[in-house]
Image (cartoon, rainbow, N blue to C red):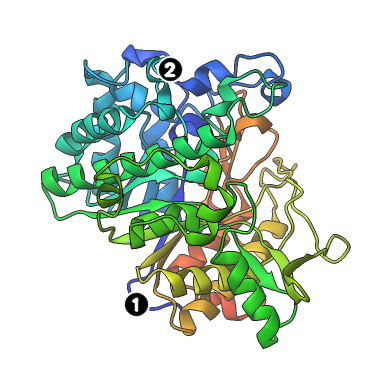
Amino acid sequence: MGFPEGFVWGASTSAYQIEGAHDADGKGPSIWDEISRKPGAVKHGDTGDVACDHYHRFAEDVGLMTNLGLHAYRFSIAWSRVLPHGTGEVNAAGLGFYDALVDKLVEANIEPYITLYHWDMPLALHRRGGWLNRDVADWFAEYTRVVVDRLSDRVSKWITINEPQCCWNMGYSDQSPPDSGAGLTHAEALQVFHNNLRAHGRATRVIREHAKTTPSVGWAPVGVTWHPATETPDDIEACRQMIQGVRKRDVWNNTWYNDPIFFGHYPEDGAKLNHDDMPKIEPGDMDLIKTPMDFMGINTYQSGAVRMGDNGPEAVSEKMARPRTNFSWPVSPEALYWGPKLIGERYDVPLYMTENGMAGFDWVSLDGRVHDPYRIDFITRYLRNLKRAVDDGVNMRGYFHWSLLDNFEWREGYEQRFGLTHVDFQTGKRTPKDSSAWYAKVIATNGACLDGTPEYAPNAPDTQEV
C-alpha cells in the first residue's frame, strides 16, 4: 500500500543556494552576498556568486524535475532580486525571472510552492536594522505584495518564512564577524523572532487580500524532533514533553514560534524561562501573528533519543549506535514518525514535510553515473516512518526532498552534497544520481515501492549537461 491518493511528491531548493547571478540584471546584494565574502566565514572561501547558475539554467532544471515526475517544486524568491533595496523600486528583470520560472513549471504540470524568505535579507534593509527593526513587517508586506501581484494568477501555495529558528544564526547574526559569537543578546534574538512572526502575519494577510487565485498559506519551521528511547508510555511522554515544550533558554524548539500563530500567545514554559528577555509586544501584535494559516511545513533531518528520568525528560546518548551522514548528523528515521505525530497532535493543521534528505560524498564514477545507495537507503527508512505517521492518522499532505540539486550549503560551502542531481560546480554539468531514478519510482508508485527491498542501483536518467 502506498501513500494516500493526492499525496504531493516534490523537491525543494532556495534562491541563494542555487541561483548564482548574484549581481546580474539589477539584483541588489543580500546579507549572504556579504557574509560569504568575510574571511573564514565559509569553508574554502566559497560563495553563492555562481552556485548552480540556476538563474540561467532554470529551463534545463525544470527538465530534471519533469524526468523525476515531480508533482510540486518548492523554491524561494530572492527578495533583493525583486526589490534591490528591499523596498521601493521593483527590478523588472528580477521579477521577470520568477515569472518565467513559474510559466515553465506550470507548462510542465509541476505546482510551484513559493517560499518568500529563506535567510537572504536585502543588505540595504539589514543596514536599517533588519529583523530587529519593527518596520521589517511593513517591508516584508511590501515585498510580498509585489510578488503576489505578479505571480498569484498561477501560484496558490505560499510559504512565508523558512526556519525561523535559523533566520537568526544563519542569515542575520552571521553579519557579525565569524569569531565574535552570535552578535546579539538573548533579548535581541527574541525580538528578532517576534518580528519574524509579525512579518509572517502581515505577509499572510497580504496574500489573502490580494491573491488572484484562492491561496493556501503556511510557513516552514524546523521540526525540532526527538524520539523515545523505548516505546514505553513513560518514554513516549518524555518525547512529547520535549517536542511540545521549551526546556531551555535557547531558540531550538517548536512551540516558541508556533504557539503564537495557533494560540495567540507565547508558551507559558518559554515565557517563564525568558521572563527577563521577553520581546516588546505592542497592542495588536498577537492578533496579527495569529492570522490563520492553511498548513505548516516541517523541515526535519534528524532526532535525538529521550527517556523519562527521575526529574523529567533526559536525553540519551546514541553516539555509538547511530550511523552518521557526511554532515555528521545521526541517521534517525524515527524523526519522521514522532515529529509529525507530536507536532500534529499539538497543532490541528495539515502538514507537509518541506525538507528532508542527507549530505553525502558524491562524485561521478568512471561509468558516468553517480552511485549513492546510502541516500536511497536513508530516504527509504525515513519515508517508511512518515508512512507510519500517516497510517496513524497524521494529516501529512506531502513530502519535499532536499534537495533537487547539489548546492551552496551556507557555511559549509560546496562540501556537503544533498542533491538528487550531482552538479559539477566548475562546468555546471548536471548528472542525475541513482537516487534520482529511485525517487522517480517512489513518485510513480505513490510510495508503494517502499514496501520491498530498495533497488540501490536503478537505471538512472542520462546525464544532462546544461
Q: Secondary structure at mark 2?
A: helix
Q: Earlier in the sequence, mark 1 or mark 2?
A: 1
Camera-near label (1 vs 2) is: 2
Q: How many numbered badges does the structure rendering display?
A: 2
**Is residue 160 positioned above or below 72 on the image?**
above
Give the residue type at disc 1.
Glu
Q: Residues within 10 Å of mark 1 (few under 14, many from 20)?
A: few
User: Looking at the image, which residue is at 44% across and 44% down?
Assistant: 162
Q: Report whether residue 338 is seen.
A: yes
| Rendered location of residue 25, percent (x, y) | 33, 14
| Rendered location of residue 128, percent (x, y) | 39, 16
Give the residue type at disc 2.
Leu
Q: Which mark is residue 203?
A: none
Q: Is residue 206 left or right of residue 178?
A: left
Q: Nearer the viewer, residue 63 or 175?
A: 175
Question: How far apart in space, not on screen, are marks 1 and 2 (Cα)?
Answer: 44 Å
| Rendered location of residue 307, percent (x, y) | 74, 74
**Is residue 457 positioned above or below 429 on the image?**
below
Disc 1 marks which residue? 5
| Rendered location of residue 259, percent (x, y) | 41, 59
Disc 2 marks which residue? 123
Q: Which quadrant of the figure has residue 243?
A: bottom right
User: Looking at the image, which residue is at 12% across and 43% down?
Assistant: 210
Q: Are marks 1 and 2 in contact (CB under 8 Å)?
A: no
Q: Nearer the viewer, residue 304 or 271?
A: 271
Q: Report whether residue 413 is seen.
A: no
Q: Is residue 170 left or right of residue 5?
A: right
